[in-house]
Image (tube, rainbow, N blue to C red):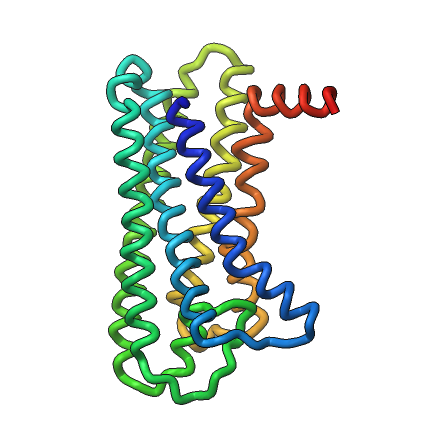
Amino acid sequence: HTPMYFFLLNLSLLDLGSISTTVPKAMANSLWDTRAISYSGCAAQVFLFIFSVGAECSLLTVMAYDRFIAICRPLHYGTLMGSSTCVKMAAAVWGSGFVNALLHTAIIFSIPLCQGNAVEQFFCEIPQILKLSCSDSYLRELGLIVFIACLFLGCFIFIVLSYMQIFTAVLRIPSEQGRHKAFSMCLPHLAVVSLFISTGMFAYLKPPSVSSPALDLLLAVLYSVVPPAVNPLIYSMRNKELKDALRKLIQWV
C-alpha cells in the first residue's frame, strides 16, 4: 500500500489495456488471414488506445515526481505523498486520459472519410485514418494532435528534469553499490519513457514526405507494443521484494 506499489498497480492496468486494445485483434486477423475491422470496433480501438497512452504518459510523470520526492526530499515524503494525495493524482491521470480520448475520438470520427476504407496499419491509428479524409475539418484534429504532443513533450521535460535532480542526489551517495543500484533502476525507465514519447510524437507529427508503410509500422510497434511489454521487467523484476516473492512462489510450486 505504499505510493510506489499503488502507482505500479495503475501502470500495470494501463499497460494491459494498451496492449490488449491492439495486439489481440491484429493476431486474430493474422490467424484468419483478414484485415477487417468494423467501424464501431475501429472507434472503440481509437478511444481505448488514446485513453491508455495518454493516461500512461501522465502516470509516468507522476511516478517520476514520486521518485524525486523519495530521493531528494525524503524527510517530507510522508507528508507530500500521503494516501489521499496519491488517490487524487491517480484520479487526475485516469480523468485526463478519458477526456483526451473522448476529444480525439469525437473529432476524428466526425470527419467525413472519402479516400477508401483501408487503414495501412495493424490497428486504427489516427494519422492513418486522417489520410482517408478529404475534408478541411481534419485541421481541427491536427491542432488537437499538436496540443497533445505539446503536453507529452511537457511530461517528458518534467521527467528529465526530475531525473537530473535525482542523479545529482544519487552522486552524493558515498557507497558505490548504492549509486549503482539507483542508476540501474532509473536509467532503464528513462530509456523506455524516451522511446515511448519520442516515437509516438514522431509518428503523429512527422511530415508526409518521410512516411512509408515500413516506417509507420516500425514506429507504431515501438510506441504501442514495446513499452507495455518492457515495463513489467523494469518495474517488477528489478524490485527486491517482488523478486523474493517470485522466488518463494517458484520454490513452493
In the rendered image, residue 202, in percent from the top left (x then y), is placed at 43, 62
Q: Position of residue 100 (x, y in %)?
A: 30, 57
Left or right: residue 191 compared with residue 64: right
Q: Does 97 sit above or below residue 164?
A: below
Left/right of residue 229 with respect to residue 150 in the rendered view = right
Q: Is 239 in front, or is 155?
A: 239
Q: Could you say which is closer to the camera, residue 122 or residue 155?
A: 122
Q: Height in image: 93 above or below 136?
A: above
- The image shows residue 12, relative to residue 236, as above or below, that is below
178 up-or-down from 131: above or below: above
179 and 224: which is toward the camera: 224
Residue ID at (44%, 76%)? 39
Residue 81 falls left or right of residue 252: left
Image quadrant where one finds the C terminus: top right
Which residue sits at x=52%, y=37%? 188
Q: Quadrant of residue 141?
A: bottom left
Q: Residue 216, percent across and down?
A: 52, 68
Which residue is outermost to the top? 174
- Quadrant containing the N terminus is top left
